[in-house]
């Protein structure tokens, strides 16, 4: 049995890890810098690998009830003609779940509700980490200190703890910006319970329902369209997508300009180690990926569950973190690399874009599904 642990960061990785650890009977606190748990975006897609983890945590049915389990995932062209389809019914038969789209706020609320009441400490910004004979000591911006038997650093892509342990990671900015929003709109039946991602000349528009009449959408654009200001943004996006087919113009028309969120797309080169001593990185802190595969949060969920299993089974945190690395490093690295490739493919224009579209249309569904199966399968 491990001594009580400390999790830094109350995002998807930190909250899921806390749920998994508490279910294993391990004591843990989560320290979150923000004064409240805020959703870092509009909606999120939880793929079958994450849904299988949530099933083991007794949460999958609650997530399905709060979100929308999807029956159709497609990449399409600007006229909504399929470039790539997957058979979600086959996936559901094999893994028990398809992908579920859910508002991030709903997912976080479900995770929080699973935790013992005083688990999460808010406005607790971690500043300094030190080793102690029995574990780790943490100092916080409010002047307080805490000691623990182990620490999970779930502090996101720009993880200050990673910077302290493994300085000098190489960020690989893409020069692309993603705009995300939620529109109140009823989609035609053909687009309900679906993820659609439309690839046009150097731009992408993805969308799915996250609840009845609520559509989560994102736009990925190149640098010339980047703007810091929201003013005129909606009209500009509408102009870019004016030649795309229904429902894309309608979704943009229904968007609330003031609530559109901007993210720069980046990841960092995979790092060989995730832990040092009794401290281990999980989620984006360890292996942030670009969003093109929709797997960053799912990989965080996988880490969270796997690390809890390892901490229960192994006699020391060091052995548990080594076991986690053996279980998870290859897959998480594969996701980072494949997501980068998907990113590049989506921006091809002109002749190269036409060739890509041809190849994607011609690829046998079984081949594509095999790739997805590797991502959806759990090895713990
Ligand atoms: C546009 C876009 C779309 C995406 N879509 C999907 C998707 O559909 N499916 C999917 O699986 N993934 C998706 N992702 C990726 C997903 O959002 C991330 O992988 C996931 O949120 C990572 O969770 P995390 O808990 O590791 O980090 P974060 O969510 O970043 O959480 C880190 C937390 O740590 C806190 N923190 C930071 N520093 C400190 C400190 N010093 N002290 C205390 N707390 C601190 C932060 O406040 C934050 O709450 C998408 C990403 C983007 C950008």
Image (cartoon, rainbow, N blue to C red):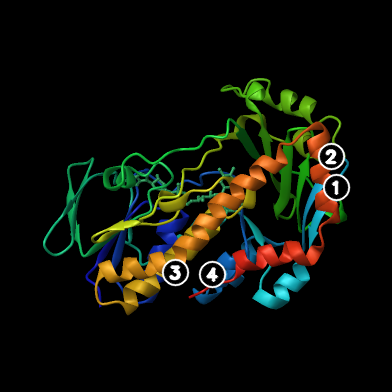
| Secondary structure found at label 3 | helix
* Residue 371 x %, y %: 67, 63
How much space separates mark 1 and mark 3, taking CA atoms?
37 Å
Kindly indicate whether the residue at mark 1 contacts the one at mark 2 (C-beta within 8 angstroms): yes
| Secondary structure found at label 4 | helix
- Residue drawn at x 73%, y 23% as measured from the top left: 236
**Left or right, 218 with reference to 188:** left
Residue 363 appears in the rendering: yes
Kindly indicate whether the residue at mark 1 contacts the one at mark 4 (C-beta within 8 angstroms): no
Badge 3 crowding class, 10 Å Cα cut-off, few under 14, some 14 to 19, many 20 or more, is some
* Residue 333 x %, y %: 50, 55
Task: Please report whichever mark, 4 or 2, sits nearer to the chain's N-terminal start.
Answer: 4
Task: Please report whichever mark, 2 or 3, sits nearer to the chain's N-terminal start.
Answer: 3
* Numbered disc total: 4
* Residue 175 x %, y %: 58, 30
Q: Badge 2 is on which residue?
A: 354
**Left or right, 352 with reference to 69:** right
Residue 113 appears in the rendering: no
Task: Please report whichever mark, 4 or 3, sits nearer to the chain's N-terminal start.
Answer: 4
Badge 1 crowding class, 10 Å Cα cut-off, few under 14, some 14 to 19, many 20 or more, is few
Kindly indicate whether the residue at mark 3 contacts the one at mark 1 (C-beta within 8 angstroms): no
Q: Quadrant of residue 206?
A: top right
Q: Badge 1 is on which residue?
A: 358
Mark 4 CB near ligand 1 (8 Å cut): no
Q: Quadrant of residue 117?
A: bottom left
How much space separates mark 4 and mark 1, taking CA atoms?
37 Å
How much space separates mark 2 and mark 3, taking CA atoms?
39 Å
Badge 2 crowding class, 10 Å Cα cut-off, few under 14, some 14 to 19, many 20 or more, is few
| Secondary structure found at label 1 | helix
Q: Badge 4 is on which residue?
A: 54
């Amino acid at each position: 049995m491990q001594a009580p642990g400390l999790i830094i960061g109350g995002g998807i990785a930190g909250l899921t890890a806390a749920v998994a650890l508490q279910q294993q009977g391990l004591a843990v606190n989560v320290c979150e810098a923000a004064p409240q748990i805020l959703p870092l975006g509009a909606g999120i897609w939880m793929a079958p690998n994450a849904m299988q983890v949530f099933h083991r945590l007794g949460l999958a049915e609650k997530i399905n009830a709060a979100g929308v389990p999807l029956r159709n995932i497609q990449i399409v062209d600007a006229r909504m003609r399929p470039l790539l389809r997957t058979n979600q019914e086959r996936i559901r038969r094999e893994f028990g779940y398809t992908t579920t789209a859910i508002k991030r706020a709903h997912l976080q609320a479900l995770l929080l509700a699973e935790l013992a009441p005083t688990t999460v400490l808010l406005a607790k910004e971690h500043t300094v980490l030190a080793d102690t004979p029995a574990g780790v000591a943490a100092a916080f911006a409010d002047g307080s200190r805490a000691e623990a038997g182990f620490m999970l650093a779930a502090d996101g892509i720009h993880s200050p703890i990673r910077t302290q342990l493994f300085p000098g990671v190489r960020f690989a900015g893409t020069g692309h910006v993603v705009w995300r929003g939620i529109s109140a709109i009823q989609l035609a039946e053909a687009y309900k319970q679906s993820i659609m991602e439309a690839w046009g000349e150097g731009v992408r528009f993805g969308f799915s329902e996250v609840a009845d009449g609520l559509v989560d959408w994102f736009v990925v654009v190149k640098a010339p369209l980047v703007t810091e200001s929201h003013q005129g943004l909606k009209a500009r996006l509408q102009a870019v997508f004016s030649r795309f087919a229904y429902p894309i113009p309608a979704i943009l028309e229904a968007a609330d300009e003031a609530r559109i969120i901007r993210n720069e797309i980046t990841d960092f080169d995979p790092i060989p180690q995730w832990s040092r001593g009794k401290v281990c990185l999980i989620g984006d802190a360890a292996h942030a990926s670009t969003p093109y595969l929709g797997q960053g949060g799912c990989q965080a969920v996988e880490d969270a569950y796997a690390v809890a299993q390892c901490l229960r089974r192994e006699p020391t945190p060091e052995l548990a973190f080594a076991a986690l690395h053996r279980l998870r490093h290859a897959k998480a690295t594969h996701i980072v690399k494949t997501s980068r490739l998907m990113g590049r493919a989506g921006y091809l224009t002109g002749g190269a874009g036409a060739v890509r579209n041809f190849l994607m249309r011609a690829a046998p569904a079984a081949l594509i599904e095999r790739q997805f199966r590797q991502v959806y399968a759990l090895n713990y």
